[in-house]
Amino acid sequence: MTEIRTPRLLLRRWHDDDLAPMADIDADPRVMRWIDDGSVRDLEHTAKAIERWEEEWDEEGFGLFAVELLASGELAGCTGLSVPEFLPQALPAVAISWRFGPQFWGQGYASEAAHATLEFALQDRGLDRVISISQVGDAASENIMRKLGMEWERETAHPVYGRPLRVHAIDLTEFEA
């Protein structure tokens, strides 16, 4: 089982008891504002998403981690790597993404988890480049991308929802782990 420990977090594969707290995160309009069309998601949708993330682990050797706080054992959200198949013009690529409950915002958890994920991408999976995709206006995500050393690459639009997107990238050979 793939696990990464940081000073405050455990990044791990998904457990059955992660479904309810992740569904709560996905049901929050503040969280979902910048994801796809901005719609909240129900328990069934979250269950299918976790199932897809686990399948990607099996197929690609990477996926989205459940992010647990070491101090309390709470599920704070998720971060990890995926192939952004929804955006064909970015392919071939591996993208890093994150999603945390609002009670965990502003404490550096997303940056800490994303940094550990980039180390995993470089050191454990041998990737030499990772992108991240955000909707135009998502300043919090773009701030994390800057902290990671990612640079703006291009703007495009979501092929289904039409929302403007920004693609950032980092050459992992220059990443400071």
Image (tube, grey):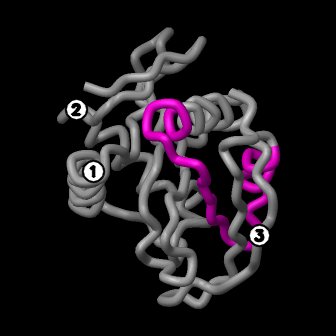
Task: Tell which circle, 2 or 3, labels the residue nearer the N-terminal end.
Answer: 2
Above/below status of 137 relative to 19: below
Q: Is residue 135 magenta?
A: yes
Question: Residue 64 appears at what percent x and percent y?
Answer: 40, 45
Which residue matches tag 2?
15
Q: Secondary structure at mark 3?
A: strand
Dot 1 amino acid type? Ile
In 3D space, how far apart are the residues under numbered discs 1 and 3 (Cα atoms)?
29 Å
Say few, some or many: other residues with alpha carbon within 10 Å of mark 1 (under 14 / 14 to 19 / 20 or more): many
Bin the neighbour count of mark 3 within 10 Å (Cα to Cα): few under 14, some 14-19, many 20 and up. Answer: few
Question: Which kind of residue does numbered mark 2 sit on?
Answer: His
Residue 140 in view in this figure: yes
Q: Which residues are magenta?
A: 120-146
> Residue beneath label 3, please?
153
Quarter that holds the N terminus: top left
Q: Earlier in the sequence, mark 1 or mark 2?
A: 2
Q: Amino acid at mark 3?
A: Glu
Q: Are marks 1 and 2 in contact (CB under 8 Å)?
A: no
Q: Residue at x 53, y 62 (%)?
A: 32
Front-lying residue, 64 or 32: 64
Q: Disc 1 designates what residue? A: 50
Left or right: where 132 falls relative to 15: right
